[in-house]
Image (cartoon, coloured by chain):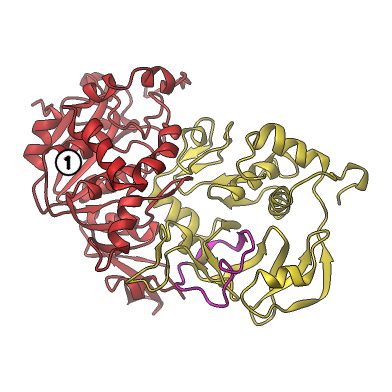
Amino acid sequence: MKSKVLPMKDAVAAFVKDGDVVVIEGFTHLICFAAGHEIIRQGRKNLTLARLTPDLIYDQMIQAGVARKLIFSWAGNPGVGSLHAFRRAVEAVPPRIEIEEYSHFGMVARLCAGAANLPFWPLRDYEGTDIPKANALIKSVECPYTGERLAAVPALRPDVTIVHAQRADAGGNTQVWGLMGVQKEAAFASKRVIVVVEELVPESVIRQDPNRTLIPGLQVDAVVVEPWGAHPSYAQGCYDRDNDFYAAWDKIAREEASFEKYLDEYVRGVKDRAEYMKKQPGLAERLKAKPRICSGVDYGY
Amino acid sequence: MIDAAQTATDYTRNELMCALAAREIGDGDVVFVGIGLPNLACNLARATHAPNMTLIYESGAVGAVPDRVPPSIGDPALVTGSLMVAPMADVFQSFLQNGKIQIGFLGGAQVDKRGNINTTAVGPYGAPKVRLPGSGGACEIAQHARRVLIVAKLDKRAFPEKVDFVTSNGGRVKKIITNMCVLEPDDTGEMTLTALYPGVTFEQVQDNVGWALKKAPRLSEVAPPSRKEIDLLRTKLDPKRLHTK
């Protein structure tokens, strides 16, 4: 098996291009901040950023000026409040960023269509709402069997999808546990896929528990090993979500000066995740997961 | 019914709001829940009269039994010990669209006379005065949960006659539980006052609602929380009193 392992810097340089449609997925869980930070460091331009919940990572990428457009379904800081760079860009007259907005189900359906190689996906949604008025790409179709009107959303085919995971082998066979979000669909919908992992494992570990594999190596272009790459998001069984950081972020992001100072210090001012972690002593001890091991299953026959 | 001897006398309106929301949940109900006060209400119901309810979060946790108040709907504590972790495609298609959800809780920056909810933008969509987060899963929860319950604090700006943007359709809203009263749709779908909190008057409610509020023919007074509900909220479920102060 050919190894796909690359340093983050090389993986982003090789697979993320100016003008790309970029998806860094992960619903609260396994959001790859490390990759977003590397894209900022490399100064990518005119990206279309797509994910259900832009979260702090896309807010940082918007502030850093890498994004031309945002495709999303919920743009907030969960349980805390606003995404301030996003709001500044959208509330500006004229707006400084283009938006294309769906609901969560609409975004999930777009990736399902992309992963299934279909042009659109039908869903029962948006009845009596203003969402289709705000987004002309949400259309409706008539069911050829029942005549029923159904909402339809177009396939999303990202140029590149980046997924964080607990472990993968060098061939990119990727195992995830805990919340799985829409990562599998995003990976299959995408032209290129980068997987960033907490741990690189031998292929035999993957083969021991094949049901755990979310994304097969055949769909993966690069494997990057960067422990703590999801912080302040989390990785189940590895480290907890940094809820204190998400709460403290509100104050940092409110003013452009403090936002830029953060980017200068923790994003542009470090070369990789290891350096980012070294700048924050005590972080790993504070968030390290307490074990809760499952007993495994018998695959014998 | 709540035994009068076990009734709390010292409680906040937010605690009562939480208890009222919890009482809407039947044992065995499958409930789709978000963060904040509805999440607290679900966990209160689970700890009291509805131990067999199933909590489903849009993040994919099914049968969650969180041992801490989850600050986000994707908290790792929702996964540990749950019955199932579903991919989000299954959450929206096989659970929600397939009609498996009995109760959906929603909140919103604006709620109107028809129960429509706005979580998208204050002011025009293309030039918003305040840009809000957007739908998330709320739009489809409002369309597919059998009963939609809104939990929201009463305020004139938050309760206009017509929302600026319909993010979630109010057609399935069965109750709006506020911190002063309960509103329910009449035969025409108009949200109408049906119950007041102890000590709250119709006029006080009307002052905080942006349309001429109709009263149900017989107004009831909501029962105060029980001692047990208050103890659970303060000692176990919301010890920092993030939602119930």
Query: Is residue A220 in view?
Result: no
The residue pinned by badge 1 equals A40
Picture coordinates of residue A223 (x, y %)?
17, 30
Q: Position of residue A221 (x, y in %)?
A: 12, 37
Q: Tell me the amino acid under the disc marked 1.
A: Ile
A291 on left or right of A122? right
Q: Chain of mark 1?
A: A
| Residue plotted at (70% across, 53% down) | B17
Check the image and name the residue furthest to the bottom: B188
Q: Is residue B178 above or below residue A301?
A: below
Q: Which chain is red?
A: A
Q: Residue A97, located in which quarter of the rendered image?
A: bottom left
Quick one: which residue is furthest to the right in this view?
Answer: B5
The answer to whether residue B14 is visible is yes
- In this view of the protein, which residue sits in the foreground, B244 or A255? A255
Residue at (36, 33) in percent of width and height: A232
Mark 1 crowdedness (10 Å alpha carbons): few <14, some 14-19, many ≥20: many
- Which structural element holds mark 1? helix
Chain B rendering hue: yellow
Dominant secondary structure of the residues highlighted in magenta in the image:
loop
Q: What are the residue bounds of the magenta stretch?
A: B143-167
Position of B178 relative to B67 (above/below):
below
Tell me which residue sits at (32%, 75%) in the image. Answer: A141
Q: Position of residue B90 (x, y in %)?
A: 42, 50
